[in-house]
Every structure is written in C-alpha cells, then in structure tokens.
Image (cartoon, coloured by chain):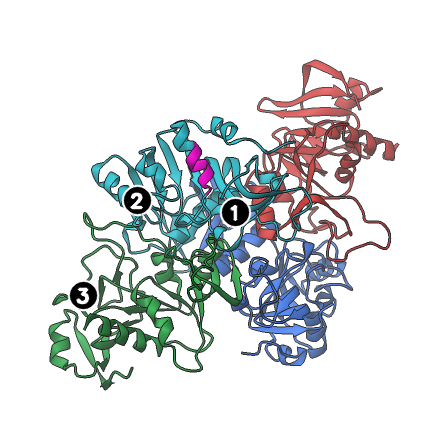
Chain colours: A cyan, B blue, C red, D green
Amino acid sequence: MNKIITIDQAMEKIEDGMTIMIGGFMGVGTPEIFIDGMLEKGVKDLTVICNDTGFVDKGLGRLVVAKRLKKVIASHIGTNPETGRQMNSGELEVELVPQGTLAERVRCGGYGLGGFLTATGIGTEVEKDKQKIKVEDKEYILELPLRADIALIRGSVVDKSGNVFYNASTRNFNPIMAMAADLVMVGAKEVVEVGELDPNHVMTPGILVEYIVGGEK
Amino acid sequence: MNKIITIDQAMEKIEDGMTIMIGGFMGVGTPEIFIDGMLEKGVKDLTVICNDTGFVDKGLGRLVVAKRLKKVIASHIGTNPETGRQMNSGELEVELVPQGTLAERVRCGGYGLGGFLTATGIGTEVEKDKQKIKVEDKEYILELPLRADIALIRGSVVDKSGNVFYNASTRNFNPIMAMAADLVMVGAKEVVEVGELDPNHVMTPGILVEYIVGGEK
Amino acid sequence: MSMDAKEIIARRIAKELKDGDIVNLGIGLPTMVANYLPEGVRVVLQSENGFVGLGGAPDSGKEDQDLVNAGGQCVTINAGGAFFDSAMSFGIIRGGHVDATVLGALEVDETGNLANYMIPGKMVPGMGGAMDLVSGAKRVIIGMIHSAKGSPKILKRCNLPLTAAGQVNLIVTEKAVIDVTEEGLVLKEIGQGVSLEDILKDTEANLIISEELKIMEI
Amino acid sequence: MSMDAKEIIARRIAKELKDGDIVNLGIGLPTMVANYLPEGVRVVLQSENGFVGLGGAPDSGKEDQDLVNAGGQCVTINAGGAFFDSAMSFGIIRGGHVDATVLGALEVDETGNLANYMIPGKMVPGMGGAMDLVSGAKRVIIGMIHSAKGSPKILKRCNLPLTAAGQVNLIVTEKAVIDVTEEGLVLKEIGQGVSLEDILKDTEANLIISEELKIMEI
C-alpha cells in the first residue's frame, strides 16, 4: 500500500465546502505545502479548525488573506489582522474556543467520546448556549467533539507506512487532529523507510494516516 | 532538588487506607519494587486503581494475596483467582470498569476535566446508577474522573529530574496515572543524568514526578 | 472435531478481512484468525495494551519482557509498528480506527446483543477491553462454536449480562455464517456437510434464510 | 516611568515564586518576571504550545524554527525539559500541575474576576490559552500598570467580558500589592514613594487596608 502521493494528487481530495483541520501553532508545525496547494487549486468555502490563523504571510493565515474560508474555529486570531477584519465585515464566521477546550474537543472527536466537562469558561461568554452539568457541587460546561473531513498535518520524520515523529514544538495540535478526521494527509519534512522510526518514538501511528506528501519545509 | 530516594523513604509516604494508582498491564510495566516495599512494610486497607490484578505471584496481585487491599478499581481480575475469591467472600470490594473507560477516567482526573461521555457500556450493567446524556440523539454515559493520593509508576529510563521514558508495552497506564495523583513515585529500571533523555522522547515530564527509586527490574 | 471446528471458524473469518484492515483479535479462537489470512491480504493487528503491528511469538530465548500482548504473552512488533499508552489505545478503538474486531461469545441474540464477559456467581473476570472494542470497532465479528453442548448460544434474547447492545455485525460458527441485519439474523452460509435442520435445531433465534444461501467456503 | 513601572512589577512578582515552581508566564510584562528571580530560586517555565523547560532566546544564527514559545518567537529548551502535544499541555494546565501563572489584565475586580482577552468591537483576538490558564493554575497573579491613563482598572465589577470568574489570587501593580480574599481586596503593600491617597484615587474597588500594610520591597 503506497501512501506517498504528489501534492496534485493530494489536492484532488480537497473539495470546496469541506471542513478541514490544520495543525500548527503560529504557523509552526503547519504543513505549508498543503496551504500552497490549496491556494493554487483555488479551493474555497472551507471551514477550518486550527489553533490560530497564523500570520498574513505564514501558516494558514494565507488562506484567510485569499478569502478561501467560510468559517474558522480557533482559539486565537490576533496575529492575523485580516481574520478580524473579515469577521467584523461579516465575510468570515469565527468561533473562538479556549485553547485547552479546542484541543480537548478535537481529541474527543478522534477518540470516540461524546463530549467532556470542563470548568474553563464558567462565568464567561464561552458558557453561552451550552449545557452546564454539576458534579459534586462543582459546575462544568459540557463541550462537544469536533471532527473534520480532512486533517492536514505536518510531520518532521514520516516513514512510508505513515508513522509520524514531530520535532520539538511542531507537535502541538497535529497528533490529536490525526485522530479526528475521515482522511488524514501529512506533509513530511523527511520521509524514511519503514522500520527506520523506533516504534517507541512514533507519535502518530501510521494506521491513522492515509497519504504522505514529501517536500514539506 | 534531589528526587532520588531509597525504597524505605518511599514507603514512609504510603499510609494505611490510601488510594493508590499502580501502573502496568498483567504485571508488565508494574513497579515491582514498590509492591515488594508495601508487602514488607505491611501497609493495608488500600484502595488500588489499576488495569488488572495481575497474577498471584506477579504484579500487584501479590498485594491481593497478602490481603492488603480494601477495594480495587480495575478492568480485569480474571488472571488472579484470589481477587475473585475475596470478592465473592466479601473480603474485597471490586469495581469493574471497561478498560477504555478506566483509562479515560484516570486521564480525566489528571487533566482537570469533570467527566466525559462514552457510549461504552450503554445497554449493559455498566450504565447502572450513572447519569445518561443525549447528544444529537445518541445516548452516552457520563463517566467521572478518578484521582489518587499516590501513583506508583514504572519507568524504563528516568533522568534525575524525573523525566520518564517507557519502553514498548510497559507504557500502558503509567503516563496517565502520573498525571492523576497528589504524589507520584517512579520505580526506575535505569536512572540517567539530566539531559541524557531527548526532550522529544520524554513521555512523562519530570514536573509530574516527585520521587524516583532506582533498582526496578 | 473440536479442533477442526475452531479451524473452520478461524479460516472463514479470515476471509472477511481486507488488505490493510486494522484488526483487534480477542484471546483464544480469534487469535487463530491471523494464521489463515488469504494470500495478498495483510492486516495490521492492534493490541489494546498499547501498540499496533503485533507480530508473532519471538524465537525461544529472544523474549522481551517489556513486549507482551493483551493476554500477557511475549510477542514481537512488526516493522512499521508503533507503541502508545492505554488512553490512546482505547481512543483508537472507540474512535472507529479499528476496522474489525473478532471476539468469542457466550451468547449472541437477534438484535446483535452480545454477552461474553461474565456468568454471575460463576465467572466474573471483568470486561477488560471487550466493551470498548465491541462499541468502537467498525465491524464486530463473533467467532464461536455454534452451541454449548447442545444448548443454543444464538438466542432470541441474551440471558447473561451484556457486553454491548446491538453491536454485533456477523456471527461465524463451524456450522453457519449469520449476518445481523435490521430485520434480524440472516443465515447466509451453511457449513459443508451441515443440514439446515441441524442449524435450526441448534439455534434458538429466528433465522431468516438468505435467498442467496450457499455452502461455506473455507 | 513606564519602563520602570513594568520592572517594578516584574521584580515584585518574581519574589512570589518559589524554588521548583512550575510557572506559565503570559506574553509581554509577565515574561519579564523570569529576569528577576531571587538568587537560589529556579522555576520551570511551561510553554502552552507544548513543552516545559522554556529557556532563553537562542544565540543569533542558532535559531531552531521548530522551537518557539507561545508568542511564536524562537526560544531554547533547558536540559531536563520535555515536549508534548496541545492536549497534554492543557491537561497539565487544567489539571493543577502549574503552580502559578502570571498574566496581564485589562480589568480585575473585587471578586477576583479577570477581563484580559477582548474589547468588544475593538479588539477581539481570542482567548488563546488564557481561560484555561486562569481556571487551572493553582495561583493566578496579575501583573499590570495600576490604571489606564488615570482610569481605574481595579474595579468593583469588571465591565469587559470575563476571562474567568473569581480566579485571581494576587494583583501586583507599580503602586500596590493586593490580595484577593473571600472578604474582598486586601491592600498588603504600597509602592515606594506612593501615597495611600494616590492608590485609593486610582482604584475603583473597595480596598481593605491590611493591618500589616508595608512598603513594597523589590
């Protein structure tokens, strides 16, 4: 089973209107190769789930600037002024989620759980319209899972069966997103043969990854 | 800050009646050095949270045989006939929890969550006396967190600041238990200097570990 | 006959697995399925104690005490395998990342209910990972001897405490292959040399006879 | 004055940290706290994008683009540090494994409410990790200039959308150190050369004057 495909083949999987998770934190650990590909293909009306919208010239912020998003679910949009501008003008729907809650919602989606209880956001606007549940007299918000059609993740070292190692702070949302989408594609900085990655060091098992595109920077 | 202590010093932390999480799966990844220590000290009336009660002569099953437990919360007790015998005779309280639910309850306790929704156990005895919550017409059980006074875990390689690497299938419940107790002690097969473990390969950060006891097999 | 029956079941189930499937095999008979995979079909085995790429038994003297399967036996890991902790292992299971699980049963019924983890007062080993596996795997295949000393195990309604409600997809015995459908249990295949009467006699549940009923090939 | 004021705040907060504490410092002024730790006090800094053992800036030319802090700047990791994913990072935060977090504020009030993440219609950057940090850290220390161009930031009741309700433990400004207690805000220390009148004028909230009121040492 050959999982290595070209960026053009990868782009054939992405359609207008899809919900896509994109790994990274301020562009670090974001698979830029797929951002390039989506910009070139002209895919649009995407709902993107991500930690932040990066910068106007780095990370998935470039998709915002090119107006390819219909909606974004993120914890932070402050480093990309274009996201705020489009939000205020009504061009882009933005759902802001506390970062820990966002990570946990993505994990829930991938781990087959129906939701979780967190105290984060109690007494703030975050609790609006959400079910609250008391456990032993402490109040929690019931937060629900997130899933996507496709997860685009970035791997530092990827073996040909799809096992992924993330270096340093590039890990962030990538491993949990790799669990939470119907189709997972990884942009690999380095592709190695099966068996070269120590099974103890694999952070995303290859069984979760459908396709690998090499040439990620 | 010296985290390395002797087994005798470690045993001073453990008192009768405490709730203790013990890592391992069928005794693999269980810190036998602490089991030895507890048997020798004569500590009793413990509530133990663990995947299984191991065997009569391996893992924490030895504590069961020596009648040191008041209650056990586990997913499986079948490989240790003494657990079943004490359960039937009323000497030992046993709470059986599906393995995935057990892992997630421990994680919830350590990750500061108030609970989670799972479909595991719906329509079975597991749902008895538990709150059920519907999300988008699907029914889930609300499962609650588990925490302990002490977690006893086993590390394959541990640096002197408490960073832990678990080899192969010894990992199992150890990393999540290391998050979920007020005090965490690790039985280390190999102790190395700070800096010898690659920060990418650390599975339990040293900030979670209070004490290290060397000499684990 | 008993050994042959198990082999028939394992061989037939092996044909249900597709190349590239992620599979979790229960202890006992289900483990045998890995021995009979059709040529060209390679599956990745998940071991719920914390890895994928479960390999065969190690050569004598080469056992690694850190590397065991969910039954506690020393095993190996294949190239391309990966270790993880119990939370992630069951995330993989509950999250639908396991294509199929093969398990034994004490009882199974018309609505796909499964009882395979306890006999109150007699055998209470705990459910281990079975409840999560049966709830989470995309396809639940039951492999078991058709009846227990003449007493049916395929029932109208399970009597024993359930492992999961309505999750079984396929039942394979040495006598029959039975699909669990919305309409009920559909008999799809009959074992070689087994009569329909024999199956009906040994089955308490109502069986809908498939219009494409055929002889089980193994 | 502005630079000095920030340094006063950072120096004073540094004295709140204990040897071995796990600390998360917000962006801006809070980051400065690490520069003024008393001798013998070593803290472990957590970076919510996924590691503990946050070190200083790398030497010029030695930047590793894979290793940044939560503000996106290239940093280093100290020996004994460890990387993890975002789910675990916030597990560490929410789970009470962070001893203290130091954050700035737009407004803080008598009940320990904090507003520091948005001004509706003006600045809506998103809360990032702030809500989890404020809910989860064992101790929440606010470091901020006492008032905004003469308009009080320590209020009876926050006007802006809250980051968290009732979670602030200590407020440190260039003029005062204020404890958040069940009874209300307790003024514990006054900045050198600052008068009580000046503080009361610049503070909307009621202040309970501690019986042990003293001059802030930095």
1 and 3 marks on the same chain: no
Q: Which residue appears at 35% of the width and 76% of the height?
A: D36
Question: Dot 2 lies on which element?
Answer: loop
> Is residue A34 highlighted in magenta?
yes
Q: Residues within 10 Å of mark 2 (few under 14, many from 20)?
A: few
> Is residue D7 highlighted in magenta?
no
Could you say which disc has been placed on residue D153 in the image?
A: 3
Please give the range of residues in magenta.
A31-37
The answer to which of B41 and D50 lies nearer the viewer is: D50
Which amino acid type is shown beneath numbered disc 2?
Asp
**Chief secondary structure of the magenta portion:** helix
Q: In the figure, C64 relative to C136: above or below?
A: below
Residue identifier under label 2: A129
Residue C49 visible in the shown view: yes
Residue identifier under label 1: A175
- Of labels 2 and 1, earlier in sequence is 2
Q: CA distance from mark 2 to mark 3?
A: 29 Å
